[in-house]
Every structure is written in structure tokens, then in C-alpha cells.
Amino acid sequence: MPALSSTMTEGKIVEWLKKPGDRVERGESVLVVESDKADMDVEAFQEGFLASVLLPSGGTAPVGETIGLIVETEAEIAAVQASAPAAPAMAAPVAPAPAEAPAPVAAAAPAAASAAPPAAVVMAVPAPVVTPVAGGRLVATPRARKLAAQLGVALESLRGSGPHGRIQAEDVERAAGQAASLPRVAEGTAPAVSAMPAPAGSANGSAAPAAVGKTFGNPGDTVAFNTLQAAVNRNMLASLAVPCFHVGYTISTDRLDAFAKTVKSKGVTMTALLAKAVGVVLARHPQVNASFSEAGMVYPPAINVAVAVAMDDGGLITPVLAAADRTDLYSLSRSWADLVARSRSKQLKPEEYSTGTFTLSNLGMYGVDRFDAILPPGTGAILAVAASRPAVVAGKDGSIAVKRQMQVNLTADHRVIYGTHAAAFLKDLAQLIETAPESLAL
Amino acid sequence: MTSALDAILFEPPLPVPFDQAWAWQRQLQARLLRDPDGPEALLLLQHPPCYTLGRGASEGFLRFDPADPPAPLFRIDRGGEVTHHLPGQLVAYPVLALQRHGGDLHLYLRDLEGAVLEVLAALGLQGERQKGLTGVWLEGRKVAAIGVSARRWISQHGLALNVTCPLEGFSAIVPCGLRGHGVTRLSDWCPGITTAMVQILLCQALARRFGLGLRPPKPTELPWR
């Protein structure tokens, strides 16, 4: 029985992975030993045959006890099997390593730690952020108090979910039997919503954005970040180490808008159209799909377009349309609808939100005329798409026309993507959207 | 002062199905087996509801039919009896080369407990160990469960700390096979606490205890790529 710890006195055999007679390679797991809440695969020191199991699965033995015998040749098996049951402790005649280990089958001894003992990393633990409600004093937000009075809920009976146990309006609603609103994708983030209007100019507020700005707390509150918000914080902070720059472009969308109308009934959304357009153009501009690593510029094997989606309960997630350049528009639209539905229930798998090679962020539905985005870690560029709005445009020939135009703004990591790369990519994207959006359906 | 050990930190922002996180650990373990000088890793995440049984665990501690579990049931290669995972519970899976950390499985279990105790202390709570029972307790109720396994001294599995998770699902089992011990969660002691807050504390406590210099994964190190 091998010692898995200096404090281990006995161990239990959970399972023999080999049967008597089985061949055993050097380093191969022979059995599993359990001690306390820890299991260890025990491996053979040298090759041979497991001749005999002296302690079956489920058995417990003191450290150092012989639990099985390994022999060098197949011929020796029979001899051991004949003698071993009679003299279980007699490992010597056939044990491959009689001198050193009491048990022929022993765990690889803990190698002397070659590195120095674990370094004590100096890192301050933040002071306690949370303390239980002090002295039984009832703390509730004004809105919670008002709601409690309206709904006839006794505040004393509630456990507050706010900071320091403060009772929030949601706690009152929950107690009153009103369903707490489920996390879902923000209505306003239209790329997330499959029935998305074309990035129509809605600067005058005719579209659907909520009447009141989104908030996660009430005046006077300090609201802790949720897991998703904390994850976004980490990513945003990481971007500070990246030398980013921005390149903008104005794209006319009359033709794209017209095409979007014709395919809307087939379930095609503007998000899918934009993702497809970006994917197709990235295929011709691999540099803009590349990212930085210490080893050099990384060219991903596929073009995966991630699209930022705000979550109603805070944070955002970037579901990925994989191989956007090669997937047809209708499949992309269906994938997007599925990804959004599962974003709502937080059932996306990591590969579905972390494998983007290029990111799209669209605030067009709010009438935003321009913005820039922060680069997600591990990628080289992100495109911020603003609203498409009618504009008076002068042509090269001096003609004047009213066209719908949107501004896009590329944020890129200058270590990989240079101004000329960004410019060429944007020019191609504009040309595709302005002159041949129908080709996206091919 | 020796420099910190290179270690990859994975913190997926959404719950990860148990079998997927398990596959990642085996992948990271296999990497470290192939390249004994390679980086260690720490997975910090939450699971959708599920139950897991240690390798030698008894189904007698299930209060449901194993053929028809209320949530997915996995029989896995770690020590210990049955446990329950669900959102609101933080799990930490260190994939460490334990020779770099003393080469002692019991010491490793005590270190995991120690990291949880540090987190509790930072929250103004005094957690306890119970002699002979691996885990961390608050006034006699279990707040963190621990179960690990190792292959050639490379660890898998780890600890589960209840933060805000509902506790009803634990009544379908006898957690860790211990009758007469309740379970608890941090939000019953620190109202308003979130998993995100505890995640930061737990990450720091594990990094300090094991001397890890944690860094995000490089694109080639993502187990799902």
C-alpha cells in the first residue's frame, strides 16, 4: 500500500484496473487507492505481469502492506499464484524490486519538489465587502418600502438581497408572489432579437427602446457585480494592455435595406446579414481576422463572427456565428435565433461564446450615429455599427442625392492590424454592402 | 522570494455542464502528463444542477432512483461520496502537479480547506474543519465539499463552495455520506453576497496558497478549441 501522504496510515483499494495475468507497462495505472477524500491512480514502476492481487477492491490495508505482486515474465505467474495465497507477505522470490520497496506495486514516490516551496504571492485580500445586517435594524430601499406598503408585504419577514442585506423592490415583489423577472436579452439590443427591424433611423424615438434607462440599482445603492458583469470587467481591463486604434467608414445602405426587406419573411435578420457580410469580406482580408500572441500573429483556421448581446440582468455575452463566411445566410439566421434563445437562459457552451475571431457590436437600432467598441481579448478587431440614417450625399459627378448611410468604426490591435489593412477591409465591406448585398444569399 | 508558478486561469462566465468541465480537466491533466514542466491550471466556474458520485461512493446515500435522477447523475473518478452541484455554488478545479506542492495528498486536501477558510475569514466568518471529515463547516453545517483525484501526482476535481445556491437539491442526497450534518451557504451568513465577489476571493486565496501566478489562457490553451 503506497503512502499518498505523510499522514496516511492506511488506504482503501477502490478498484484494481488490472486483473491477475494482465500485462502491465511501466507507468501504467494498476489500481486506484483512496485515502480520505482523495483518489490516486497507482502505477507500475516497471513492466511485467500482475501475478496476484492480495487485497481485493474495497479492502483496506496499512501503508507498506503488500497488496499485489508483479512479475517480470509470464512464466512466473503460475509459480506466484501457487505460492502467494499461502504466504502473502513473501514478495521476495518474484518481486521485481525486492530491495527498495516493501510493496512491489507502489505509487510513484513524491519526487522531491524540484522547485522551491510555493512562493508566497503578495496579494492583498480585500477587506470584507459584506457584513450581515447590523443590530437587526431593518434596511430597505425607499422603493421597496413603498411597494411593500402597496402590496401589503411585511418588510420584517423578508431577507434582503441587496448590499448589506438591504431589502430591494425585487425582494418585495418576490414575497408578494410576483414573478421576479427572468434574465433575458435586452430588448434594446436589437441584434439579439430575431425580429429585428432594419437598422432604421429611430433617432426620433419611434422604435422600441425602453422608456426609462436601464439600471441595476436604486439611488444610494452600491450593487455588486454579477458573474457575467465581473467577467466583462476582466475582459475590458485586459484590453488596456492592447495598443488599439480606430478607423471609421460611412456606408450607404439603401440596397442592403431593400434586400433585407425581401428576405425578412424567410427569417433573415440584419444581424445575420451583417455577420455574413463581415465574414465574406474577412475571408479576403485574413489579416483583420488575425490576433496577437507572444509567439506571433495568430491566423485562426476559421472565421467566427461574435456578436455582442447585452443581458437584461447585466453583463454581455458574445455568441459566435461559426464559419460565417461559409455558412449560408438562412442557416446563419437560424443559428442566431437559437444562440439568442439560449443566451437568455444562460445555456450557451463556452465554445459558443468564446471562440469569436472577430466581433460585431451594433447599436444602430438606438439611432446612435457613431461609437467605438473595446477590443475583446484574444481577437484583433471589433466593428462598431451605428444607425443607418438618410443623408444628403454629393456624388463625384456633382449630383446630389438622399441616401441612407451608416457609420462603422473598426477598433483594431495595431500589433497585428495596420491602418492600411483596416482601410482595405472597410472599403471592401462598403463595396459589398453598397453594390452587391444580394450576393450574401448565394 | 521565488517567482510564482505559471498557471492558466479559466473563468467561464456561464455555467458549464459537469461532463464538459470534467473533460477539460482530463485534457489539462493529460497535457501536464505529457509536459511535466508545463503550466498548471485552475478552473473556477459553476455547474447547471447535477449530482456526482465518487469512485467508491455508495448509491445508498441517494434519496432517489439512480436510474431516474432529478438532475443528471455522474459517477466520476474522485474520492468521496455523493455531492450536488448547481448555479450559485462556486467550484474550483485545480489541475496541479502536486510534487510542486509537497507531494502529499492529505496536505493537498488541507490546503484546499485552508483556501476556503481564508475566504471565509475575509468575509468575517470563522469556518471550521472537522476532524476526520474533509470539508469546511460553519457552525456544524457544511459550506464547502472537497473531493480530488490524482494521476501521477497531477490533480483533478477539487472543491465546491455554496454561495447563493438554493439548498433544496441537497435533500435528495446524504451529502458526502454524512448523516446528521446539514449544509449551508454563504448568503445565509452574508446577505447580499454574490458568487462574483467570492470568486475573486477564492481565486486569490488559491493563488496565494499554491504560489500560482495565474494568467488567462492563450488561444492555443483553450480546452474547447
Image (cartoon, helix red, strand yellow):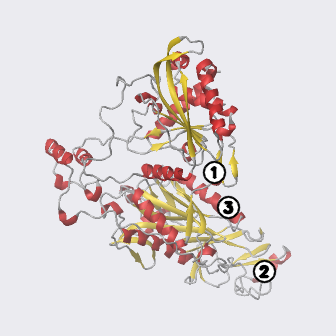
Q: Are marks 2 and 3 in contact (CB under 8 Å)?
A: no
Disc 1 residue crowd, few under 14, some 14–19, many 20+, Cα 10 Å: some
Disc 2 residue crowd, few under 14, some 14–19, many 20+, Cα 10 Å: many
Secondary structure found at label 2:
helix
| Residue A332 appears left or right of B45 | right
Q: Are marks 2 and 1 in contact (CB under 8 Å)?
A: no
x, y (%) of residue B205?
47, 69
Instruction: Quote the CA–CA distance across marks 1 and 3.
Output: 18 Å
Residue at screen point 32% across, 43% down: A215
Of callouts 1 and 3, which one flags the residue occurring earlier in the amino acid sequence? Answer: 3
* Residue identifier under label 1: B219
Quadrant in the rendering for residue A72: bottom right
Disc 3 residue crowd, few under 14, some 14–19, many 20+, Cα 10 Å: some
x, y (%) of residue B88?
40, 55
* Residue identifier under label 3: B30
Q: Amino acid at mark 2?
A: Val
Q: Is residue B67 visible?
A: no
| Residue A301 appears left or right of A152 | right
Mark number displayed over residue B109 = none
Foreground residue among A382 and B224: A382
Residue at screen point 38% across, 60% down: B163
Residue at screen point 29% across, 35% down: A212
Q: Amino acid at mark 3?
A: Ala
Secondary structure found at label 3:
helix
* Residue identifier under label 2: A80
> Is residue A128 positioned above or below A394 on the image?
below
The quadrant of the image that shows the C terminus of chain A is top right
Foreground: disc 2 or disc 3: 3
Instruction: Quote the CA–CA distance across marks 2 and 1.
Output: 53 Å
Whether labels 2 and 1 share one chain: no
